[in-house]
Image (cartoon, rainbow, N blue to C red):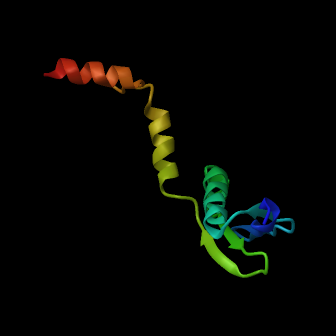
């Protein structure tokens, strides 16, 4: 059995507000877990934009079965806050700074 025999096609439809984009081409993945991970990555990347806060990614199997409805993860908002605050005074930007700060604190 070659590599081409074990991959399956999954479809990633995008829904936000009253809009939708239906994936007609699909993407090959080795298994359902890989496809769901990819769907989460899509939701997180597109969901960063405030205009797509209501985004949902519908993951379908090759035969059209709905496998999951995925929303952007809550961690994206926290990640944005962390990135915005990383240049504030008192925030350590590099692991070396953290080690030095901890070693001198004692």
Which residue lies most toward the front here? 1
Left or right position of 3 against 97: right
Query: Can residue 68 be seen in this snapshot?
Result: yes
Residue 77, percent across and down?
A: 50, 50
Q: Is residue 55 above or below residue 65?
A: above
**Residue sitting at x 67%, y 56%:** 42
Q: Relative to 46, is 94 on the left or the right? A: left
23 up-or-down from 84: above or below:
below
Could you say which is closer to the camera, residue 79 or residue 42?
42
Instruction: Residue at 62%, 72% (x, y): give it.
Output: 69
Image quadrant holding the C terminus, namely top left
Residue 26 occupies quadrant: bottom right
Could one spot residue 89 in this view of the protein? no
Quarter that holds the N terminus: bottom right
| Residue at the extreme right | 25
Labels in figure, total: 0
Report x, y in % for residue 11: 77, 69
The residue at the point 52 percent across, 58 percent down is 73
**Residue 28: image x %, image y %?**
78, 62
In-image side of 29 versus 87 (left or right)? right
Residue 25 pos. (x, y %): 86, 65
- Does 15 appear above or below 52? below
Which residue is nearer to you in this view: 82 or 29?
Answer: 29
In the picture as drawn, the residue positioned furthest to the left comes out as: 106
Quarter location, residue 4: bottom right
Q: Is residue 26 left or right of residue 46?
A: right
Q: Residue at x 26, y 21 (%)?
A: 101
In the picture, residue 88 is in which quadrant? top left
- Front one among 16 and 56: 56
């Amino acid at each position: 059995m070659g590599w081409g025999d074990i991959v399956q096609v999954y479809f990633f439809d995008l829904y936000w507000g009253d809009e939708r984009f239906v994936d007609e081409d699909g993407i090959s993945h080795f298994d359902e877990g890989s496809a769901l991970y990819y769907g989460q990555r899509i939701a997180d990347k597109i969901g960063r934009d405030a205009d797509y806060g209501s985004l949902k990614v519908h993951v379908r199997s090759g035969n059209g079965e709905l496998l999951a409805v995925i929303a952007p993860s809550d961690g994206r908002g926290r990640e944005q806050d962390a990135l915005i605050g990383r240049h504030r005074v008192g925030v350590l930007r590099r692991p070396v700074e953290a080690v030095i700060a901890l070693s001198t604190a004692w």
